Each structure stands twice: as structure tokens, then as C-alpha cells.
Amino acid sequence: MTLPTPDNDAEHYLRLARQEQRGRLTVYLGAAPGVGKTYRMLQDAARRQAEGVDVVVGVAETHGRSETALLLEPLDVLPRHRMNHQGHMLDEFDIDRAIERHPALILVDELAHSNAPGSRHPKRWQDVEELLAAGIDVATTINIQHIESLNDVVAGFTYVRVRETVPDNILDDAELIVVDLPPDALIERLAAGKIYMPDTAGRALSNFFTPNKLAALRELALRFAASSVDRRLSDQLRTTGKESDFVAGERLMVAVSPGKGGAQVIRHAKRMADMFNAPWTAVVVESGRARAIIGAQREQLADNLALAASLGASLMTVAADRVGEALVDQARQLRASQIVIGKSRRSRWFEWVHGSVAQAVIRKAQGVAVHVVPLTDADEKPDKPREALLARDDMIALAIVAAMVGLLHLAQPWLPFGAIDLLLLVPVILSATVLRLRAGLWSALWAALCYNFFFIPPLHTFTIDDPQNVITFLVLALVATVVGWLAGRIRRQAETSAGVARLNASLARFAGLMGGLSQKEETAQVACREIGSLLDVEAIIVTIEDGDIVVRGNDAYRALDIVGEAAVRWALDRGVPTGRDTGTLNASDWQFHPLKTSLGTMGALGLARPSQERIIRPDDAIMLASLVDQTALAHERIVLEGQARQVDTLRERDRLRGALLSSIAHDLRTPLTAVIAAAEAIPVEGAFAEEVSIARSESRRLQRFLNDLLEASRIEHGTIEPRWESVDLTDIIADVLHALRQDHADARVTTRIDSDCPFVSSDALLLRHVLINLIDNALKFSPATAKVEVELLCRGQEVVCRVSDEGPGLPTNTDSLFDRFHRLEGSDRVGGSGLGLWIAKNFTEAVGGTITAGNRAGQGAVFEVILPVFRKDEAEGRAADA
Amino acid sequence: MHKDVLIVEDEPAIRRLLVAALARSAMTYVEAGNASDALRLAAVQPAPLVALLDLGLPDRDGLEIIPQLVGYGLAVIVLTARDATDEKVTALDLGADDFVTKPFDSAELLARVRSALRRKTGSRTHPQRRDFEGGSIDREAHSTTIEGATVALTPREFDLLWALCEKPGRVLTHTSLLETVWGPAHRQDVDYLRVAIRALRKKIEADPSRPKLIMNEPGVGYRLAGSARMAE
């Protein structure tokens, strides 16, 4: 099996498909073949091309009509992809090339077409979906009878059932263009041989072309288009807020049965939902009886649900024994205003015995309209293999009864007469509980007959003389039947709960196993082994690591074929199941289920089964969903644990780095202290005055540098915790000027201090550091003779400390001024760690203040430290007190 | 004869510097490189007058031996890092006289040592009067003079100035000042202290925004400028 791509590059179309902007769909809708949809589509396309739109023809069926073929000439036609299917060469639409070519508009004729087996999607409408998802506008054609929800209606009056249908929701957002031709004209065209019909369907199709049927089809097409326009209009109204135009509160619920008729009911419900423009829900009631259904029936039910989902219903499953009541309850919960239910035509007798769900619903429903869709019996009865009249179980039941009868016959002389009928109940109960209900009922009948034959005089006949014995016989028959029925029911319930218990036990075991693992490889191995044995399939776990597909969990499958790879990528990309038995890339041998978690899709679970059966039996679907969830969770946990470990490592490394930095800084500090003390001790005089002065200032600088580094590492580690106290900024400024040797009469710094400034709640040392950095900067960056002014002023609930210099000022863009290691041009000359302003900013913010920078009107820079008088919580406390 | 200073410092380079500075100022000294040596030397009678104590000692935390040193009668000056506010406050609370932050300026260090020595040796001839740079305070007359002129102080301001003058050059922590002047109930009311200091500075400082008399030690407390003299 190879993927139908010329370059076999699965990655490629995925990348292209990812382009999000969705394309628009234009649908040319016709009532019947031959109305001229393709022709009209091509005409429009030619016009669009003339307008400068990049138009490509993906598929256009000319059916040999020359005027249509003529229209194709000016257009760019995409070559078809030739596929070999069982010796036939089929030309199919080449979706990969289309996506690669990525035109603005592509024409894809015949939306309802089924692709050749082995194509990426089984249906052409899926190709169209992909094109739309890739952001390409698509124009396509369809005849009314191919629309899923109208399928029954059309079949109803044309007696032709079309198998190729398109789900209605594809057309939801499409612009519909009705290509209309009056029936007479159409028949004329048919007569003139202008309408192409495939040979195989020719005769059947000719059934269409009677004036009545064409008129009906035409009406259907027009009505469909009209309701589509209606819906779009009301959508628009809703978005513009005019809700009164929207029929409020209608809500539909449809009961889904496992029979083929279920599909018919679902389509009916869809039409009604469209009519009311109402949301709708498809409900399945899982009763004891429904659970007993098997095989083909189960699949039919699954198909029905899939149909409902594809038509836009939300799905719901309810477990209950009384179907009718459960449906009404559910309708109440859903606040449904309409219930749609199917009813097969059965004999009155059958209904009297079994009851009818529809009857029960009608009886119980209050305030809900119930629509009953009549079904034929054949529709309702799923095709299942007829069971033999007497199955193996029934034979065993008969044998047990026979054995009991023999035993009783021998023991009769010693037994009181009344004991025999009671003892005959034993095999009935036995077979009803151990075997099946039917076997129980059989044995009840058998026991009653045996009783009559062997024990009621006249013996060895089926006649009864004594009227008393007639009653005894009837009682035995009745009791046997009832007992058998009850026992069978109990057994079935026990089986159901045992099944549930088994399911839960398997899941619990699985969860337990997965919980203990911490390695990817190991987890995959265990998960695949367990899932494989639980579902009786081959399982693998596929992930994409560094762009490559990695298969884990099953040593037998180290590599996937190209279709498998494409399916994996699709599953991971879109988060939907792909591969066998699904709608996408079902040519793959594998079915892939994405492992979705809160972290994204972790990978995919691949399942395969050597036989041709469905990979997932309908009964296992719930279990599979749980297993997929558990596996995904296990993978998520491993990833999270890995991340946590990584974070721990990083944190430890960071801690070590911090420890190293402070230990180095400490070790540097001690000798530096000695150097500074020594330099300060030498008087700045005599021949070496200049050198001593340099030694002093440079060692002080080195010390500030070191302090900056230490402070920076404190900031980085978030260990700045202000020591809150009431701070008088006057004190701080005085202290800073003292430290900078600027408190002498000859100092460059002048102060202007509002002596009535309130104290601020702050940290004295942090503020001291901020001001030292700012004032020191101001001194460094302005000429040696220029003044630096420090102002303290109050402004409402804030105190502002302003440091201005007469230096060159700041660049106009001061965004990065407070960044770490930011240095102004020319600042190399004055030297600094590049951390000063960053530290100032961090410290200011740590005490709840802000710091700003700007230029003075004349010359020089100005920095402002704005401090709130009260701490945030204090201020709030005060406000609360007030 | 007692020594002037006990140097407790484990770092040889700094010890050598301290020794050189003290020797230059003609002060006598003994050296210790760790806490146990320091305690041994402090126990020798007559004990040294002042201890220069580095807190990071190899055998013990310097803070631990402050009470013992004080107990032996030494005035303790702690050598500490600039940002170690809590350490400073603890040291002062444990009885230390003063602190000098590293890296220190030897002139300033010597001034502190001298001031401490003076407090140790100085005799108070006039128990009710203290002089300070540019002024004096007299408790008996309840008067304060600055540059010869009388300044009117409120009772609190007077008490505060007196408290500072009682231990000239010594750092008094916020809590100790609050306790002395306002009473134990107000140990935490730093605002009271700030307001009073500000008011006091306006009355006794030439330029209140650049105080020369009442010096601030950020986060720790206040001191009366070290050059204050005892009344003789």
C-alpha cells in the first residue's frame, strides 16, 4: 500500500494543511443530473479568473459535452492522480497536488463522489473539507438527492436510493447557488441526448425523468436552498442581536434504535431540527435488552450514532431498563420540546406482549410534542443470522429436564405426589440461570409437558382426566415459565453488572500498572501489552520526537508504512482518530487514537487486528476511550515529572551559582577592605598624592562594583525583603552625601529639601543604596565642576527625591536605561558595573516606589524616585479605618 | 599598666592595618586572632579599655562574646559589614559601644576608638552638664546653649539631646532612645523619634538638612557626633 502522493511526502501536505484561514465553499445545487451545474460553475470560474482570481480546476466532469469542454480551455486544469485499483485504472482528484498548488479557488465537481479505495479519504467531500481547512476556496456541485437528510425523502418518491451521500453540515456554511431548469426543458434535453448517464445506473436514473418526479425534486432543491438562506439570515440576526426573529427554546431529542430504521428516524429529526432551527440530541437507551444485542446490531447502532453526529446532533447514552420512561426523563432534562421516535409496524399482539416504546413515551410525555416516524418491520429488524430453533443451550436445558424426569420416574414410589411438580421446577430454574432465558423458557415448556406425559394419569398420554390435574398442570406451566423468566432476567442482570465490574476491574488494574511507571519505554510496553490483551488487538504507541516518528511498546512493529505515518501525523495534528475504520486514511492497517492531555497531544495509540473485523468492537468503545485516557495521563505524568526534575536541577544549579558568587564576593571583600583601609590611611600629599588619590578612588570603585554584583544576585534570587520602618529621607540623603564625601562645603552636590516632608514607610538601607547609585552616577556623568542637585519634595501621598545633573543628559529612548548591564555610550570612560540603575529600580520597586528618568529642560539628566508615604497594606488599612 | 585596645580580628592583613594605625596614634594594643584568645586577653587584669571586635571569627560568632567582653569592662567596637543592619542592632543591644562598617576609613576608625577611650577614662566633674561641638546642655538649669545663645527645647527634645550627650559618639539604637525618653511602652514608635530628631535638628544644627551634630545610622539609630567632649 502506498500513499497516493507523487512524492510520498506525508509531512508536506500536513504542513500545507495547517494553514488556518478556512476557505469558502460554493455549492451549485441541482434537482437532477443534467441541469447544468458543471457548466454554470465553469462559467463563474472563467469570470472569476478574468477578475484576476487564481482559479484551478481540480475535477470537472464534462461528460463529453463539447460546450462544457470548451469552457475548460482557458482554465488551469490540475492533472488527475492515476490509481490502480484491482486492475482498473482510476483517475482520481489529486488532493496533494491541489494543496501544494494552493490556488485561491479550486473547482471540485461532484461533491458526493466516492474516492477509489486507497485514497486518503473515502469520500470526496472529505477532500473538500481538507481543501477548505487549508484555506482554499472551493466550488463544487451536488444533486439534491445526495444530501444526507433528504436521502429518505427522495428515495420515498423516486424509489431510487442513492448510496453516495454528503452530510448536511458540509453545506451549513456554504453559499448555495441553485441551478434551476424547468422539468419540461430537462426532459427535452434528455430526449436530445444531452444528459449523460452512467451505463450501470442508466435505467434506474431514467426513473427520475418523469415530469412529476422532476417537479418534486425541483421543489425539494428550491426549498432546501430557501431554508439554507433562512438559516443564514437568522444566524445573522442572532449575531446582530435581534433575537425575537429566532424561534426560541425549541429543542429536539431523537431516540436512536439499533435497527436500520434508526437512520431514517435520525434523518427525519435532522430535517425537523433544521425547520425549527433548533439544537438536537440523539439519545440511546441502554436497557438490559439493548445490552444483549450483539454483532451486526451493535455495529448498526454505532453507525446510526455516527450518522446523527455527522448531521450535527449531540450524542447521549442513558442506562435504564424502562426505555420509554428513560426517554421522557431525558427529554425533561434536556428541556426538549420535541421528541422524535420511530415505531415499527408490528402486530397488535406483539405490542400487547412487549409494549411499544413509542406508546410508553406518548403516555408519559407531558408538555412535549412526540413525533412518531413509522418504520417498516424490515427496517427495524436488523439483519442478523437466524438462530436455529433449538440452540445448544436449549438442548442442554432439555437434557437436564429429561434427566430430572428420569430420576423422578424412578423415585416416584417414594415421593408424595405433590413433590413431583415442585421438583420439576428445579431443572427450569437451573437452565434459566445457568443457560439463557430462552433455554429456561424451553425447559419450562418441556417440564410441563413431561409432567403431563409421565406423571398425570392417564400416564403416557398428553390427555388429562382429572380436572384437578388440569389445574395442577397449568399451575406448573405458569410457575415454570415465570420462574424461568425471572431467573433468566436475574442472570442477565448479574452478567451486566459482572461485565461492568470486570470493565472497572480491568481499568483499575490498568491505571494501577500505569501509575507505577516512570520511563517512557516501559510505560509504552506495559500499556501496549495490557491494551492488547484487553481488547484482543495489536497495540503500539507512536510519538513524534524531533520530527521523526518513534514507535514504542511492541517490538514487532518498529516501523510504519507511509500511510501509517501519514495517519499518525494526521491524528497528532488534528487530535482525531485516523486510520482503519475511520474517515481519514482508512487504507492504513492501523487505527490511531491521539493521546490528548492538557499539555497537548502526547502521541497516538495505534491498534491493529490481523482479521478483517472492525478493530474496535462496538462494545469495547467505552473501554478503549478509558484506556486511551489512562495512557495519555501516564505519558503526561512522565513528561511533567521530567520537567519537575529539570526544574529541580536548574534550581540547584542556580543555588550553587548564587552560593559561589557570594562566597567569591565575600573572599574578595576582605582583602579589598584591607586595601581601602590602607589607601585611606596614606595622606594625599607629597610626590605621590596623585597615585594615592587614584588608589583610593579605584579601590572604592572596585568595592562598589562588588557590592553591585552581590546586590544583583540577591535581586535575582528574590531575596530582597524590605525591613520596613519609618524613614526620614533627610537622614538618608545626609548619610549618602557623607558616604560620597559630598557633605563638605566644597562638595558638588547641593540640596533643596522640603523639611516638612513626611516620613515614608520604607527600608533605609535599600533607599540609601538607590540614592548612592543615582547621585554617584550624576557625579560621574557630569563634568568635574558641574553641580548635582538633590531635591526632596512632597506631592500628595508621595515623597519625591529628585537627582539632577548638568551632564550630557540621556538618550531620547530611555526604555532600556534600567536594564541589566545597560551602559550609556561613553560610559566606559567613567566605568561602572552596568548594574547601578537596574539595582536602583529593583530596590525602589521593592519598597513600593517607582523610578523615572528624563532630561532637564536646559542640560543634563534628571532621575526621580517616587515613594509612597504609606505601604500598600498600610494605606488600605487606613482607608478601611476611615 | 593596661593596654588601650584589644584587637580581635582573624584576617592578618586587616589586623596589621589596625596595628599600624593604632601604633601611629601612640595607642597600646594586644592582638587576638580568635574568640578564645580574645577572652583570655580580656580576662587579664587590668583589662584593655577598648575591644575592636570582628564578628566573623574562626571559632565562634563574635556576637557571642560581646557580653563577656563588656563584663570584663571593655568598651566594644564592632567591625561589621555595611548591610548587616540586624547584626549591628544585635551587637548594640548586647552591650557593644559602637560599630564601624567595613571597608573602613582608618581616620574614622581611630576617631571612634579615641572617643570610646575618652568615655572610659574621662571623669565627669560636672554630673549635670554635657558639652558638645558648638554647644552644651545643662540638666540642672534645664538649659541648652548653641554658639553661646540659649535655645528653647521642649522637655522631650531636651531629654533626647541629654540621652545622646550622655554617650557622645556612641550609636544609640532607636529602641534604646525611645525607651529612655518615651518609656518602654513606646519602644516601637520610631515616628516619635524621627519627629523629635527633626525638630531638635532645626533648633541646634546649622543646616538641618546636612546635620553635623546628630548623625543618622540608617536602620540602626542615632549618635551625637564623635568629636563631642566631656565636660571637664
Image: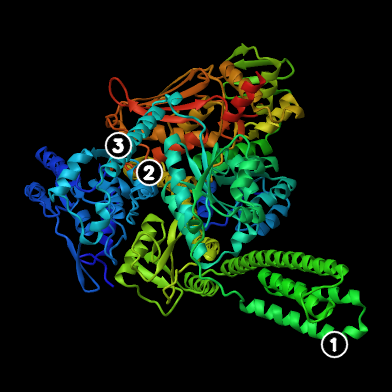
Q: In the image shown, does A550 or A461 lie closer to the viewer?
A: A461
Which amino acid is tagged 1?
Leu
The answer to whether any part of residue A416 appears in the image is yes
Q: Earlier in the sequence, mark 3 or mark 1?
A: 3
Q: Is residue A35 left or right of residue B199?
A: left
Q: Name the mark nearer the viewer: 1 or 2.
A: 1
| Extreme residue in the bottom direction | A410
Which amino acid is tagged 3?
Leu
**What subunit carries mark 3?**
A
Q: Earlier in the sequence, mark 3 or mark 2?
A: 3
Q: In the image shown, does A94 or B202 lie closer to the viewer?
A: A94
Q: Earlier in the sequence, mark 1 or mark 2?
A: 1
Kindly identify which residue carries mark 3: A222
- For residue A179, the mark is none
| Whether label 3 touches label 1, CB < 8 Å | no
For mark 2, give the secondary structure. loop
For mark 3, give the secondary structure. helix
Q: CA distance from mark 1 to mark 2?
A: 106 Å
> Looking at the picture, does residue B221 appear above or below residue A359?
above
Return the x and y of residue A130 as percentages of the image width and height.
29, 52
- In the picture, the quarter occupied by the C terminus of chain B is top right
| Whether label 1 touches label 2, CB < 8 Å | no
Q: Is residue A820 left or right of residue A520?
A: left
Q: CA distance from mark 3 to mark 1?
A: 82 Å
Q: In this rendering, do the residues under marks 1 and 2 share a single chain? A: yes
The answer to whether any part of residue A659 appears in the image is no
**What subunit carries mark 2?**
A
Kindly identify which residue carries mark 2: A820
Kindly identify which residue carries mark 1: A410
Mark 3: few/some/many CA within 10 Å (<14, 14-19, 20+): many
Q: Examine the image and state in which quarter residue A817 appears.
A: top left
Which amino acid is tagged 2?
Arg
